[in-house]
Image (cartoon, rainbow, N blue to C red):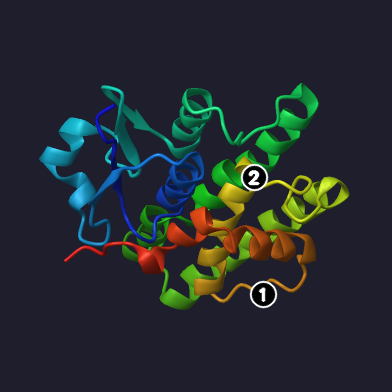
Amino acid sequence: MTRPILHDYFRSSASYRVRIALNLKGVEYEQHSVGLAEGAQKSAEYRALNPQGFVPMLEIDGLRLTQSLSIMVYLDQRFPEPLLMPRDPAEGAHVRSLALLVACDIHPLNNLRVLKYLKSELGHDQAEVDGWYRHWVAEGLAALEAMAAPRAGRFLHGDTATLADVCLVPQLFNARRFEVPLEPYPTLLRADEAASALPPFAAAHPDRQEQPA
């Protein structure tokens, strides 16, 4: 197999998820950093590869895969061990619900393009933008805590890292950047600590990635 190429950005939550998944699966890959802050994702060259102009995009097996959850499902099917989602239908549905809560409910309201639009187009100052971020993150994390706690162990679902933890760790990284209080979420903090200690998670951390020049 030709070595996959991951188009990503070091602080992108969605890219961070895919890096973790690739590492968990033991897939070696090359990285192409796309400077989101500089608008490189809007370039004609990049949009020719990914018309949506988002990261991550994974070039693998002759495919160009976009959307982090779709990429991770592909990786879970292509490289079955270790599983990111339990095989049991009910447990798998629960794990996907936790992952989707982060990826589809919390993250889209707080990604870079939304925050930029609030400030540059709608005229909100930085304090208002930060308030927006903290409000929606806190609301989402409270729901995630309540949903995860009954079935959590060391991780969000039992004692094995799953897709839910792959989504959680990048979200909490960004929450800390914006100084969101995390003490109300002991289940999430326990899972974050356990997952972050694993080498595949640690190697995907933004501080260990190439940054745009």
Of callouts 2 and 1, the N-terminal one: 2
137 is higher (above) or lower (below) than 183: above
Residue with the mark numbered 2: 164
Mark-to-mark CA distance, 2 and 1: 21 Å
**Is 208 positioned to the left or the right of 142 in the image?**
left
Image coords of residue 101 (percent x, y): 64, 44
Q: Residue furthest left?
A: 45
Image coords of residue 109 (percent x, y): 51, 52
Q: Residues within 10 Å of mark 2 (few under 14, many from 20)?
A: many
Give the residue type that dot 2 points to.
Ala
Image coords of residue 203 (percent x, y): 44, 59
Q: Residues within 10 Å of mark 1 (few under 14, many from 20)?
A: few
Numbered badge on residue 181: 1
Residue 123 shows up from this direction: no
Q: Quadrant of residue 87?
A: top right
Q: Quadrant of residue 138?
A: bottom right
